[in-house]
Image: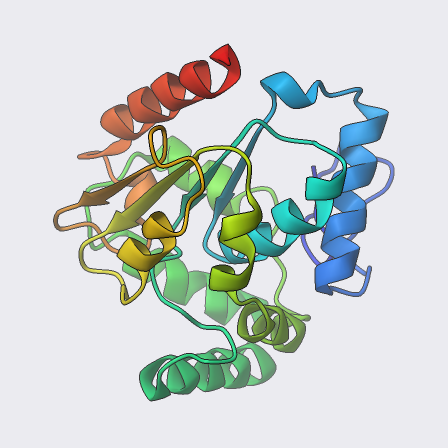
Amino acid sequence: MDMPGHGTLEDRPLTLEDTPLTLDSRVDATAKVHQECGLDPSTTIYVGASLGAYIGFYILDTLAAKPSFSGAILMDCGQNVGPDCSLKARMGLSFLKMAAGHMSNKALMEAMLGVAKKSPTKSRLVESVFGTGMHFQQGSAQTVCLHTVAPADHIPNFDFPVLFFNGSEDYRDSEKKWLSLCKDQKRSSLKVYGGGDHFFTHDARFVDDLIDRMDDFAKQAVAT
């Protein structure tokens, strides 16, 4: 599905590229897809990476009043970038906001792909991430969303297990705290890939293990 501010999939008559990107617009889009696709909460897992993971904390908590998911897989979200984040995180958010406001989409994409190619990759996975259309006109709004979400306020409200994935070379200052706040401690877990960066999800060294762990987690999450 295309989330607000992202995507121009050619085979879809309607995209949400120009929809204002806010936390609540993300919640509305997720709820709409959930309803229109007739998804069964007992067999549906939320999966988000980077921005999708951070916003996922908010989405999952907001939709908790009406059970929608039986588990969540959240990747690349080991750093606290919320209201009480560190000075280092604030500086990173400021740089992200500035880059999105002054660099073209093409330049941003080339920069991201340049980072991705520093590690062993599977080209099809890179295509799946960047090929569907990723737009940065709402980069400022993305930064606002990131800095608004306070994971520690949301995680204790999840009645389902959470699987966290991070790369050891990515920014991480709160991953163990996020795990410790999970209500379902028995089935929640954290995996850190040594040598992986923010783009570890398409790193050929990890992808098979990543998929296997996601599959095992999903089976266990929906079993109960």
Q: Quadrant of the N terminus?
A: top right
Residue plotted at (48% across, 43% down): 129
* Image color mode: rainbow
Q: Nearer the viewer, residue 54 or 150?
A: 150
Of residue 196 and residue 204, the one placed in the foreground of this image is 196
Quadrant of the rendered image containing residue 164: top left
Left or right of residue 82, residue 26 in this image? right
Q: Position of residue 212 (x, y in %)?
A: 30, 20
Q: Is residue 108 left or right of residue 137?
A: left
Measuring from the top left, give residue 190's x and y in whole percent: 28, 42
Is residue 173 at all visible to an observer of this figure?
A: yes
User: At 54% from the left edge and 81% from the top edge, which residue is drawn?
Assistant: 97
Q: Residue at x 35, y 37 (%)?
A: 185
Depicted 136 relative to depicted 206: above or below: below
166 shown above or below 122? below
**Which quadrant holds residue 40?**
top right
Measured as percent of width and height from the top left, residue 38 is found at 80, 19
Locate residue 102 relative to residue 184 in the image: left or right: right
Extreme residue in the left direction: 194
Q: How many numbered discs?
A: 0
Observer able to see residue 52: no
**Percent x, y of residue 199:** 33, 51
